Image (cartoon, rainbow, N blue to C red):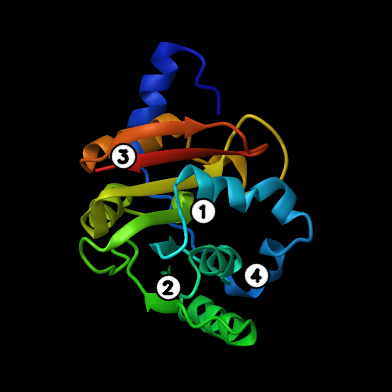
């Protein structure tokens, strides 16, 4: 959708802040998330670098799907770290558990969360990632508030989602959320924007702190 005019931006922000996207990704389509080119355009190492995720960190993958990003986080934080892999769908959590067993990863804990609450331990997380899932959330501000409570004082929340200004992978254009809306959600949840990264070809990365 076009948001080039100030008036149009205001209308769009108001509409998207109150809209309810809330369309969970269907588990039967998990294979669509596992394309051989995803590493090239998703750039997971750069995303983790932007959040300062290092060996021994405690992190979370919210809306983790089949665990594509979860296993990369688990390798990054190593055996001294911990990854909470959360999804609201039991089938997704089952897929993650199978995956981490297959890959021999002992530093992943799965959580079946709620749409507005990932049920993370309070004040323990160095970083939380929501990758390609924010547009599926129904009550986005409530989710952000609950994530904020899970962060350490220096913890960071990274939100990666698809831009609406081009082609490439991702959901239909009418399901995408522009960065300004996500920033407004964060502000309403008591978070502050730390950076907006532009190294991804099809997506934006917004980094928030408490």
Q: Secondary structure at mark 1?
A: strand
Measured Cα–Cα span from mark 3 to mark 1? 16 Å
Tell me if residue 16 can be seen.
no
Q: Position of residue 21 (x, y in %)?
A: 43, 50
Label 4 Cα crowd, 10 Å radius (few <14 / some 14-19 / many 20+) = some
User: If you read the primary sequence from the N terminus, does the residue marked by circle 1 or circle 2 appear first?
Assistant: 2
Q: Position of residue 170 (x, y in %)?
A: 64, 48
Q: Are marks 1 and 2 in contact (CB under 8 Å)?
A: no
Q: Secondary structure at mark 2?
A: loop
Q: Are marks 3 and 1 in contact (CB under 8 Å)?
A: no
Q: Which residue is mark 1?
A: 131
Measured Cα–Cα span from mark 3 to mark 4? 28 Å
Mark drawn on residue 74: none
Q: Residue at x 57, y 70 (%)?
A: 71
Q: Residue at x 58, y 36 (%)?
A: 163
Label 1 Cα crowd, 10 Å radius (few <14 / some 14-19 / many 20+) = many
Q: Secondary structure at mark 3?
A: helix
User: If you read the primary sequence from the N terminus, does the residue marked by circle 3 or circle 2 appear first?
Assistant: 2
- Placement of 13 over or under 101, stated as above or below: above
Q: Are marks 2 and 4 in contact (CB under 8 Å)?
A: no
Q: Secondary structure at mark 4?
A: helix
Q: Residue at x 41, y 78 (%)?
A: 109
Q: Which residue is mark 2?
A: 80
User: If you read the primary sequence from the N terminus, does the residue marked by circle 3 or circle 1 appear first?
Assistant: 1
Measured Cα–Cα span from mark 2 to mark 4? 29 Å
Q: Which residue is mark 4?
A: 30
Q: Which residue is mark 3?
A: 185
């Amino acid at each position: 959708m076009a948001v080039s005019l100030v008036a149009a931006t205001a209308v769009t922000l108001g509409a998207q802040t109150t809209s309810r996207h809330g369309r969970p990704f269907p588990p039967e389509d998990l294979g669509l998330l596992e394309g051989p080119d995803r590493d090239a355009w998703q750039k997971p190492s750069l995303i983790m670098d932007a959040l300062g995720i290092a060996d021994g960190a405690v992190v979370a993958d919210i809306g983790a799907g089949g665990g594509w990003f979860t296993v990369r986080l688990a390798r990054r934080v190593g055996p001294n770290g911990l990854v909470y892999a959360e999804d609201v769908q039991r089938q997704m959590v089952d897929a993650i558990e199978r995956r981490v067993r297959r890959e021999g990863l002992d530093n992943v804990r799965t959580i079946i969360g709620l749409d507005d609450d990932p049920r993370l331990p309070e004040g323990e997380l160095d970083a939380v990632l929501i990758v390609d899932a924010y547009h599926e959330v129904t009550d986005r501000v409530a989710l952000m508030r609950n994530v904020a409570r899970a962060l350490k004082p220096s913890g960071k929340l990274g939100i990666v989602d698809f831009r609406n200004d081009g082609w490439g992978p991702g959901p239909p254009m009418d399901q995408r959320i522009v960065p300004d809306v996500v920033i407004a959600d964060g502000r309403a949840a008591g978070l502050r924007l730390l950076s907006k990264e532009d190294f991804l070809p099809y997506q934006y990365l917004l980094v928030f702190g408490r």
